[in-house]
Amino acid sequence: MYHSHDFYELIWFADGWGKQLLNEQECICESGTVTLLRPGDRHCFQDQSEEMRIISLSVRQEEFERICDIYDALLLQRIRAYAAPLQFPAVPGLMPSEDYYRDRQNVTEYDCKLLLALFLRSCIENTDCLSETRELPGQLAKAIDEMKKTENLRLGITAFEQLSHYSRSHLARLIRAHFGMSLKQYINEQRLRSAYNELILTYRPAEDISEELGFQSFSHFNKIFKERFAITPAALRKRHGTWTL
């Protein structure tokens, strides 16, 4: 049945192929690809191969958009900009097999959050129109990718300057032009996003996460974390942490 819904749905084609009607457009979806359906997008299957196997993940609108904002403040804006639902290849070698889910007696919240994280990573890394490094100077784009690593976030602006091979003043101008932030604000934003993921996906003490990412102190970390996400690290882990289930 040709239909739409009020939540986000991600459909991963683990094997085979399927022919879909997506917002009035016919589309062939092959093994290894992911389709992202937004609230209001219309779709239905018209044909499929005998061996087609899919894994579908439905996510409440407010939850999906909250996670998008953590990954990239502009990601949701880009996702909404397209008339047709988005399709992109899954990150090779990272997606669990369909057997992983089929053989589980209970699929946990952790499984769902992990799958959503893998889907969003695939979307960001493999869809040119959504890449946060699109239109950035190549030198800066490479440095930004390297700055996602914990050891570089810990060193902060010093590491960013060395990796980019720009002077600090030029690097600051580029970050202001592309992201509307100072260097300090940009580094803190990346640290906070990394801390958020660590808090909900691991059981590591928040104090260790704060120290490893280079925050001045644990109290400072708590303060700016709450300012950014309107929740304390402890409350976030209690409400959304997969290891507390």
Image (cartoon, rainbow, N blue to C red):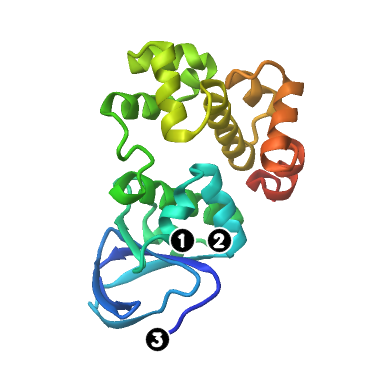
On the image, the x and y values in percent for residue 95 come to 37, 51
Q: CA distance from mark 3 to mark 2?
A: 28 Å
On the image, the x and y values in percent for residue 34 come to 34, 61
Q: Is disc 1 placed on a helix, strand or loop?
A: helix
In this picture, residue 165 sits left or right of residue 200: left
Q: Is residue 79 above or below residue 117?
A: below
Q: Which residue is mark 2?
A: 107
Q: Is disc 2 placed on a helix, strand or loop?
A: loop
Name the front one of labels 3 and 1.
Answer: 3
Q: Which residue is mark 3?
A: 2
Please tell me in which quadrant of the rendered image residue 93 appears: top left
10 Å neighbourhood of mark 2: few (<14), some, or many (≥20)? few
Q: CA distance from mark 2 to mark 1?
A: 7 Å
First in sequence: mark 2 vs mark 1: 1
Are discs 3 and 1 less than 8 Å apart at CB?
no
Q: Give, as a three-letter code, the residue at label 1.
A: Tyr
On the image, the x and y values in percent for residue 15 come to 27, 65
Q: Give, as a three-letter code, the residue at label 2.
A: Val
Report how many numbered discs are placed on residues in the image: 3
- Residue at image location 34% in from the left, 44% down from the top: 125
10 Å neighbourhood of mark 3: few (<14), some, or many (≥20)? few
Q: Which residue is mark 1?
A: 101
Are discs 3 and 2 less than 8 Å apart at CB?
no
Name the front one of labels 3 and 2.
Answer: 3
In this picture, residue 146 sits left or right of residue 220: left
10 Å neighbourhood of mark 1: few (<14), some, or many (≥20)? few
Which numbered tag is attached to residue 29? none
